[in-house]
């Protein structure tokens, strides 16, 4: 079911010099990195220069997948949200609804910026059909799926989608090489509002009270959607190994699943119960105050199977946290030099040692300064993205 917000008004979208950009992404789920990137760029932009509207497919039959999302907040700021049905729910319907949106509204936009490579064959094809000259394809990952069949499926879909793109973009060198090979691409950093993630001792104390974590007990934190890519089942096993070294530690996994599902959550709770430490694993779900949790954590833990350059890792560094990553995460992610990398097939004891060392090392107050110097503030990145669109239109 195609939906858009109720206070939709017909306006002349091409008036003045303002550039109109349609951002196309999987969802506006608050726990998804791509969603947070688009949200950060939108709210930090200069509306007189660039205006963003958004198309996503995070619904089935008109029912939203996520309870905590940015839709309403962005609509209140005057950004149109076009919602089409999830491709995985009804692929043909997804194609029909994308066709309907772009047929009716596409010509009003100067740029279509697609963050879904395996849907670009449809999105960017439709954009070309209605005469949108500038079609950007953005790579956010260094793999196309954690599922072998899906990876196989995505090869032709990605290949066709790239044919309709006029310009390529990526969040990291590794993500760019994965999708575009030797073709040129623009590197666009995942900038965040750095001050929002500064350490807050009051927030840490309040969250410890909420979760029942005693002051001084170390907290290992994971942030992100509850999907196989994030490898949270492995996180529980690595945490079990850590408890042999640091028995007072806690694990907090912040994020949720699609459409209120609890499959991953239930499996984590079940495994923690089997290992007899369910009282030390906390699953707060998707939170609107997610930035406060970085003040609760003593170490940020990301054992992902693959990533591009994860927004949550940038957020963790902005909070000065030591970070423990898998080698599925690009080395470029360690912007502030506060992280370590461990192979996914390394013994659990190696992971326990890495986590323990990170906890003992403490926070890095210089990390946010390094992030800002590297251009990872939302303001600097939003300005860079606006300049990018302006260059496109001046060609």
Image (spheres, rainbow, N blue to C red):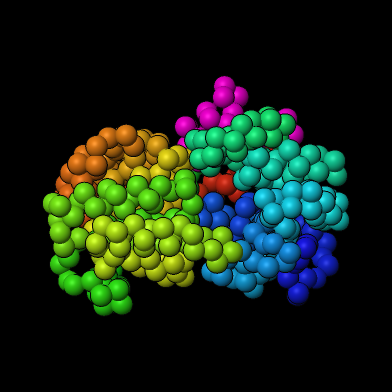
The percent position of residue 289, horizontal first and vertical second, equals 42, 70
In the drawing, does residue 289 fall left or right of residue 247? right
Question: In the image, is residue 309 above or below residue 61?
Answer: above
- Quadrant of the drawing holding the N terminus: bottom right
Residue 168 belongs to magenta span:
yes
In the drawing, does residue 45 fall left or right of residue 239? right
The percent position of residue 340, horizontal first and vertical second, equals 26, 40
Range of the magenta residues?
Answer: 163-184
Nearer to us in this view, 23 or 356: 356
Question: In the image, is residue 167 above or below residue 84?
Answer: above
The furthest residue to the top: 182
Q: Residue at x 55, y 35 (%)?
A: 148
In the drawing, does residue 3 fall left or right of residue 52? right
Q: Residue at x 73, y 58 (%)?
A: 84
The percent position of residue 105, horizontal first and vertical second, equals 82, 56
Q: Residue at x 54, y 39 (%)?
A: 147
Q: Residue at x 26, y 52 (%)?
A: 239
Q: Which quadrant of the figure has residue 179? A: top right
């Amino acid at each position: 079911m195609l939906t858009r917000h109720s206070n939709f008004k017909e306006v002349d979208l091409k008036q003045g010099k303002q550039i109109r950009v349609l951002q196309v992404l999987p969802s506006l789920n608050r726990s998804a990195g791509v969603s947070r990137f688009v949200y950060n760029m939108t709210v930090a932009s200069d509306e007189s220069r660039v205006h963003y509207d958004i198309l996503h497919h995070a619904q089935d039959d008109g029912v939203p997948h996520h309870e905590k999302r940015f839709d309403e907040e962005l609509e209140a700021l005057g950004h149109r949200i076009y919602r089409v049905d999830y491709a995985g729910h009804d692929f043909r319907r997804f194609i029909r609804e994308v066709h309907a949106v772009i047929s009716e509204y596409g010509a009003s936009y100067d740029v279509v910026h697609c963050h879904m490579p395996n849907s670009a064959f449809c999105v960017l094809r439709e954009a070309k059909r209605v005469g949108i000259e500038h079609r950007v394809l953005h790579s956010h990952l260094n793999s196309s799926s954690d599922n072998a069949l899906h990876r196989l499926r995505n090869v032709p879909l990605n290949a066709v989608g790239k044919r309709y793109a006029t310009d390529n973009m990526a969040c990291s060198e590794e993500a760019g090489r994965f999708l575009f090979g030797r073709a040129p691409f623009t590197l666009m950093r995942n900038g965040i509002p750095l001050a929002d993630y500064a350490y807050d001792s009051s927030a840490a104390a309040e969250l410890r009270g909420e979760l029942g974590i005693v002051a001084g007990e170390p907290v290992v934190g994971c942030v992100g959607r509850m999907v196989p890519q994030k490898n949270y089942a492995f996180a529980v096993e690595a945490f079990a190994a850590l408890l042999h070294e640091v028995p007072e530690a806690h694990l907090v996994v912040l994020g949720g699943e699609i459409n209120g599902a609890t499959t991953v959550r239930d499996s984590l709770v079940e495994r923690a119960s089997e290992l007899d430490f369910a009282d030390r694993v906390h699953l707060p779900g998707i939170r609107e105050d997610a930035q406060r949790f970085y003040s609760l954590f003593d170490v940020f833990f990301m054992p992902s199977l693959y990533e591009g350059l994860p927004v949550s890792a940038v957020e963790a560094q902005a909070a000065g946290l030591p970070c423990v990553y898998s080698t599925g995460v690009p080395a470029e992610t360690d912007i502030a030099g506060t992280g370590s990398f461990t192979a996914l097939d390394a013994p659990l004891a190696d992971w326990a040692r890495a986590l323990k060392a990170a906890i003992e090392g403490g926070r890095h107050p210089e990390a946010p300064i390094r992030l800002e110097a590297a251009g990872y503030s939302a303001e600097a990145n939003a300005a860079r993205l606006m300049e990018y669109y302006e260059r496109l239109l001046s060609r």
